[in-house]
Each structure stands twice: as structure tokens, then as C-alpha cells.
Amino acid sequence: MPLSSSAAISIAELISGAGRDESRCFVTGLSDKTEETLRSLGALDGLPEDHVIRNRLDAIRRAVALAQN
């Protein structure tokens, strides 16, 4: 099922909100098509490149590493 533009806008707002209160936000498990759509709509612009991670376990590892620093 393709990602709707309203869903992409909601995701962008969640990411933006996480940035406002200094939370760390990771996005994981995106299909290639969904990631392409989110990027084309600018929904992932507020995230560092290394916070978009394919695998949930890798995202958890990254978050733990950041928390320990």
C-alpha cells in the first residue's frame, strides 16, 4: 500500500516535534518506496542521515550508543 501524503505530513510533524524538545528520533523499517516518498516530500529533512535505519535492532544499538556518549 503506498504512503499517502497526509501520512507523510504526519510523520514530518512527529519528527519536527521530537526535535523541538531535544528528543532523539529514529525511523526504522521503511521500504525503499516509502523512504523515497518521505524523502521526496521532505518528511525526513529534520533527521540526521544516520537516524534513518533499515533494521530495528540496528536502530536500538545506535540509540544506546548515543545515550552512552
Image: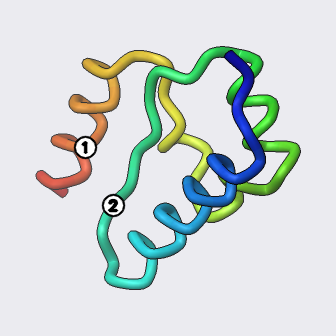
Identify the mark at residue 63; answer none if there is no mark: 1
24 or 6: which is nearer to us?
6
Looking at the image, the residue that sits furthest to the right is: 40
Identify which residue is drawn at 77% across, 48% down: 5
Secondary element type, mark 2? loop
Is 34 situated left or right of 13 in this image? right
Secondary element type, mark 1? helix
Q: Quadrant of the C terminus?
A: bottom left
52 or 50: which is nearer to us?
52
Q: How did the renderer colour the structure?
A: rainbow
Residue type, label 1:
Ala
Is 45 situated left or right of 18 in this image? right
User: Is residue 62 placed above or below 58 in the rendered structure?
Assistant: below
Identify which residue is drawn at 80% across, 30% down: 36
Q: Which residue is mark 2?
A: 24
User: Is residue 23 placed above or below 22 in the rendered structure?
Assistant: above
Position in image of residue 55 (x %, y %): 40, 16
Identify the mark at residue 22; answer none if there is no mark: none
Position in image of residue 53 (x %, y %): 48, 28
Identify which residue is drawn at 83% across, 51% down: 41
User: Is residue 29 placed above or below 20 in the rendered structure?
Assistant: above
Identify which residue is drawn at 33% across, 78% down: 22
Residue 25 lies in quadrant:
bottom left
Position in image of residue 30 (x %, y %): 56, 23
Residue 1 lies in quadrant:
top right
Is 8 situated left or right of 51 in this image? right
Position in image of residue 6 (x %, y %): 69, 53
